[in-house]
Amino acid sequence: MTFALLAPAAGVGTAVTTFLTAFLLSLLLRRPWLYWPAFVVLWASGPIFAVSQAATGALVVPIAGGMIYFALIAAFIYRFGWLGNLVAATCLVWLGGTPLTTDTSAWYFGWGLAGAAVVLALGVYGFVTAVGGQRLFREGFFGDE
Amino acid sequence: MLYELFTGRRAFPGDRRDTPPSKPSSHVTGLSPAVERVVLRCLELDPANRPHSASEVLAALPGGDPLAAAVAAGETPSPQMVADAGEVGRISPRLGLVLLAALAGGLLLLAWLNSRVSLLGLAPVRQPPTEMARRARQLLADFGYPDPPADAAGHYYVDRPYLIRVAQRDPSPDRWRHLADGRPSAVYFFYRQSPEPMAATSISGEVPLIGRADPPPTRPGMATVLLDASGRLLELSVVPRNDDMRPRPGGSCDWGQLFRAAGLEFDPKTVIPDGDWVPPCAFDERVTVPGQLPDRPDVPTRVEAAAYGGRPVWFRLTVDGWVTGRAINLPTQFVISLLLAPLGILLAARNVRARRADWHGASCLTLFVLGNALLAWVIGGHHAPAVLGELEQAAAVVARYGLQAALLGLFYLALEPFVRRRWPWGQTAWNRLLAGRFRSPLVGRDVLAGLVFCVSLVLLSSAIKLGAEAVGLPPSLPTPAGPPTPHGPLPP
């Protein structure tokens, strides 16, 4: 539980690390076509050293999977910047500590549901704010002109 | 005024202002759509949707982008200028609904996939912590320690080093199948009780938690029990009390009860009196028992057990050379931050002197991290009715997260101005949030996008794992996803 409760603080740390890596690479390499691929390669090579699956000869999955994973993160940072990155990182830590399950008889089902509800509540806030007061349905959609 | 300036008419001819004004382009031809958007935004019925400052109006007018001008001139734009620049960020209700539905659907899909890729799915944890604590307490009573404790704590934990070891050694596609057996496994239940309130003060964990050595097991009567997810005994450690010196009726320790608690077969003929090891507590008898798991005869085991006054004080089951509960927690990121701190101080001082530093943003981030840690400790930490112990724990949280938050603030002061100068557009939503504009559509859009992106990433990660399994490659480490570990005082 403490792991999930600390998600915002841990998320800030993760987001700062990824964002600053991209920024420092941009300072070093200058060209976007150079520093974004460098960002992907740098992070995708992480699992090889961290989990050291080299002994099992199963490097294809962490490398290929890592490339796709971090290419998406690079594209997301490029498009949405710091706040989106911070929210995504915090959510990743939060879900990592949330026991989501469809097994309603499991004793931790309620914990998982509560964790998902927090994410959804934040999503509803994002939706309502992002729409900025626009009508969801055309006037008269429900025959109430 | 802008409306009148461009159209020659008043935006609201009468006194009523409850309907939006007609479009300026319906009165004049050739009006730039960008100008029309700005004029209409200034006349939004909801004040929250109007521009927040003159510089925001200027930024939105054609050719009036002060941020672009500042960046082009090589200047560092102020946080206010960054917040006012850029797009409104509003999305269409249809896109918003699609994203919200994707978020809800993604979470549901994730819950379903978790049974196949998460640790909870592969190593089922069927009993809640309260039941496991009851089991541990019952075992202690059976071993001759029936007195109710003054304080107790228990939680599940994940033995990640064991998972990594399996990933390194076993290349088979079904290398995680034994996680469900529970021995060896990756999920354990840890229980400690004491005749006095316990207070953890170590700052190596996320928050001070009762651990094997925190507080140190020095008080007579303290006991530690480690169970596998099925409730079988893996380890026992008791600090004997003075009363325990009196020999128990029946003489020597009944080693068989320990084996029964561990779900192992006990054959007195295999018992080796004595051993080449020393338990971490006083003892007057010790035995070593080699054997194998009942359901996996190919897996060798070794049991070390010790007793004092006829009561067991130590038990440890070692399976196939693997010792339970070893965990290495190296705060690498924290250490690197400390090493880089002098550079951060130099850069921060430079930015402060040049009046580029964003004190407001740095203090918000620092207080947020520290406040979050204190809240997590208050809700999820172990609390006992001991004022001094609580103060010590609070001090440990402030020490650990205060330093971490201060370092974060330092690096924010040091590096944020450079990011603001080079990538200001990526900072707009963040600076609007810091300015308290929680209803800015751009903030909402980025929050919603971040959440949808996060769920998509987790789903992608699960899909990669399942895809690897489908083609016969060894599956990667299971996703943690719990189990939840309440750390508060356990009910009697």
Image: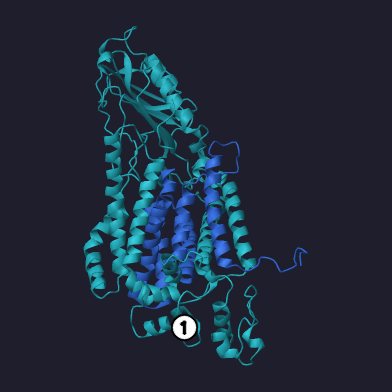
Chain colours: A blue, B cyan
B316 above or below A26?
A: above
User: Taking the image as drawn, is residue B210 in sight?
Assistant: yes
Residue B164: horizontal and vertical position, in percent? 40, 46
Residue lying at the far right in this picture: please name it: A143
B209 sits left or right of B430 in the view = left
| Residue A124 shown left or right of residue B243 in the figure | right
**Rendering coords of residue B153 (x, y %):** 38, 32
Q: Determine the residue positioned at 34% across, 41% down.
A: B327
Q: Quadrant of the C terminus of chain A?
A: bottom right
Q: Is residue A24 above or below residue B25?
A: above
Q: Position of residue A25 (x, y in %)?
A: 36, 71
From the viewer's perspective, is A60 left or right of B313?
A: right
Question: Which residue is depicted at the point 45% across and 25% down?
Answer: B134
- Crowding at dot 1, Cα within 10 Å, few <14 / some 14-19 / many 20+, comes out as some
Label 1 marks which chain's residue?
B
> Which residue occupies the foreground of this view, B7 or B182?
B7
- Image point (25%, 69%), residue name: B347
User: Is residue B317 in view from this perspective?
Assistant: no
Q: Nearer the viewer, residue A126 or B3?
A: B3
* Residue that carries the numbered disc 1 in the rendered image: B58
Classify residue A63 as left or right of residue A127: left
Label 1 SS: helix
- Residue B69 location, x and y as percent? 40, 85
In the foreground, B106 or A126: A126
The amino acid sitting under disc 1 is: Leu
